[in-house]
Amino acid sequence: MSDAENRNDTVPLKTYDGNELIAKVIEKHKKLLDDYGAQFSEIDGRVRSANERITSSKEKKEHVATRTEVLTEKRQLFYHQAEKVLEEMGSSYGNDPLVQKELKLVAEEFPKLKGTLSPEDEKKHADLIFASISSVHSNLIKARAAVDSFRGRINEAMDANAELASLKNPEENPDQAREDAEKELGELEQKHKWLENRINSHREALAHWERVSVSAPGEAEVKS
């Protein structure tokens, strides 16, 4: 192909005057700000979510520790109160042989309730005790108030133990949830910071060229 043909096939270069060039630079920075802004918005949301999950996991762990301490003390207190009621019944109604026999069975079974038991095992021991204490009520009507009080304390202790069991076996492990969130946060932070820096850089550049655009084009030194 001849040089003349090459010259004829060459696409003519478009030239820009000062104002057009500045407008192109401004357009470029705006486009990059839009692109980086969209990426940053998505990652920033994930960063906030990860931080919230970390905070929530720590709070849940603290709540579990505090609640466990409270429930353990409540359970011990309720059993102590039930034991006192049992002792009072023994002192008040000890002359009745049938009542004394049932109270003895209750007293023998009662210590098993105070150990660290699953709610299921605890209920089995409680049912045995309730069967014997019901006989006391049947044989001695005036013991009804004491029997009801005894039952009430044991039921409250069992409720505390059931909640303790649920705290020990939560649907979501706070430690694992925190570790997962911290891992995700670590993976996001570098990109998050990079995008933040790029956005700040392009904002500064855009502000510069927008100022330049209102000045005489010939006075501007173009830098993109």
Image (spheres, rainbow, N blue to C red):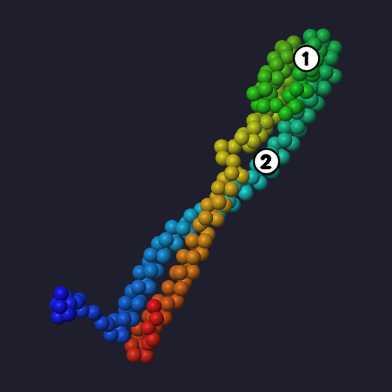
- The quadrant in which residue 2 appears is bottom left
Q: Residues within 10 Å of mark 1 (few under 14, many from 20)?
A: some
Q: Residue at x 35, y 76 (%)?
A: 26
Residue 170's spot in the image, x, y percent?
Answer: 59, 37
> 26 above or below 219?
above
Q: Is residue 6 above or below residue 194?
A: below
Mark number for residue 67? Answer: 2
Q: Which residue is mark 1?
A: 105
Q: Is residue 47 left or right of residue 205?
A: right
Image quadrant where one finds the C terminus: bottom left
The answer to whether residue 186 is visible is: yes
Q: Quadrant of the N terminus?
A: bottom left
Distance, label 1 to label 2, CA atoms, is 33 Å
Residue type pointed to by label 1: Leu
| Of residues 105 and 207, the one drawn nearer to the viewer in this rendering | 207
Q: Is residue 186 left or right of residue 111?
A: left
Please tell me whether mark 2 sits on a helix, a strand or a loop.
helix
